[in-house]
Image: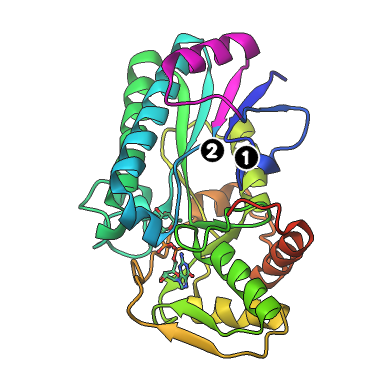
Amino acid sequence: MGKIIVTGGKGLVGRCFDSDRFFRSTSTNLTERDQVRNYLQSVKADGIIHTAAKVGGVKGNMSFPADFTYQNLMMNTILIEEARLAGIRKLISFASTCVFPDKAEYPLTPEQIHLGPPHSSNYGYAYAKRMADVQIQAYREQYGVNYFSVIPCNIYGPGDNYDLENGHVIPALIHKFYLAKERNEDVTIWGSGNPLREFIFSKDVAKLVELLYDNYDSGVPVILSTGEEVSIGDIVSIIAEIFEFKGKIIFDKDKPEGQFRKPSDNSIIKEMFPDFKFTPVKDGLRESVEWFISNYPNVRK
Ligand code: GFB
């Protein structure tokens, strides 16, 4: 079994590919073509799992649309082309359920990706990720390579980015509750708490992607979700309970809420891996909080 490069090897998902089958790249600047070419020549892998991306939460996407557009477009465009030139036969590229049109039929299905504009809060990231799948479809057609996209819902887990302004909701809340407990302060949540999200544990994503790497050869993008929606308010209650937080929790409705919901159709993975056990969100959150407490302050923030 040949080596598989994992880009973004230190990231939330990339760090989960920890068997010696994987070669985690951590320092190659994927927006620099020469670096990518030299790296692929030095490793000589059979496949690539491309988890690296410029990512962030609703506010990060709204504050830096140009960075999210340019960096993701460059990374994906260069890597997919250099992979082809290096003779890489299999490549899996990560998108996210925010790529779907804001006005779509629920549950979201792969066929709907291009049927309308994404939500205004993350159009830069969403269009860049859509373009990666366009490039993949074109390369499958012209070069017969077995490249495809996976489309995870909101991912969370240990080793995330805990940036309080630009990070995703779960790491931001874990960081906020930790500080509030330390300083005996209140916690402020963005929005009403009503928006719904599907959350999948990072280690489950890595397991599913490895299974797909070995068993999936179609160009149809694969949605990776649990199929279960939870409200942000529920997530807040679970994290507060794990921290045994007794202080005040304030909902600031002036803060951005993003899309109200993005429920997705996970039937491809359900049919292929009917016995796959998703980590319950309560267990995943407990493991994520414990990791944060035992690693703070040496965390990305
Ligand atoms: O995780 P998040 O920033 O991303 O926000 P999206 C999810 C929900 O949590 C929103 C609420 O409704 C936020 O208003 N929220 C409450 C908070 N408190 C907080 C907080 O302290 N920080 C944050 N960040 N949110 C992203 C896309 O959308 O989803 C990305 O913009 C990517 O491109 C990612 O797709 C997975 O789910 O709204």
> Which amino acid, by three-letter code, is at mark 1?
Gly
Left or right: where does residue 178 sit relative to residue 119? right
Give percent across and percent down for residue 189: 48, 78
Give percent across and percent down for residue 251: 44, 84
Q: Quadrant of residue 289?
A: bottom right
Decide if ligand 1 comes within 8 Å of the CB at mark 2. Answer: no
> Which amino acid, by three-letter code, is at mark 2?
Thr
Distance between the alpha carbons at the discs numbered 1 and 2: 6 Å
Q: Nearer the viewer, residue 28 or 52?
A: 28
Q: Secondary structure at mark 1?
A: helix
Q: Can residue 130 be seen? A: no
Residue at the front extreme, as displayed: 183
Give percent across and percent down for residue 18: 74, 37
First of labels 1, 2 by sequence position: 1
Tell me the magenta residue range: 27-49
Indicate which disc residue 51 carries.
Answer: 2
What quarter of the picture does the C terminus occupy? bottom right
Q: Residues within 10 Å of mark 2 (few under 14, many from 20)?
A: many
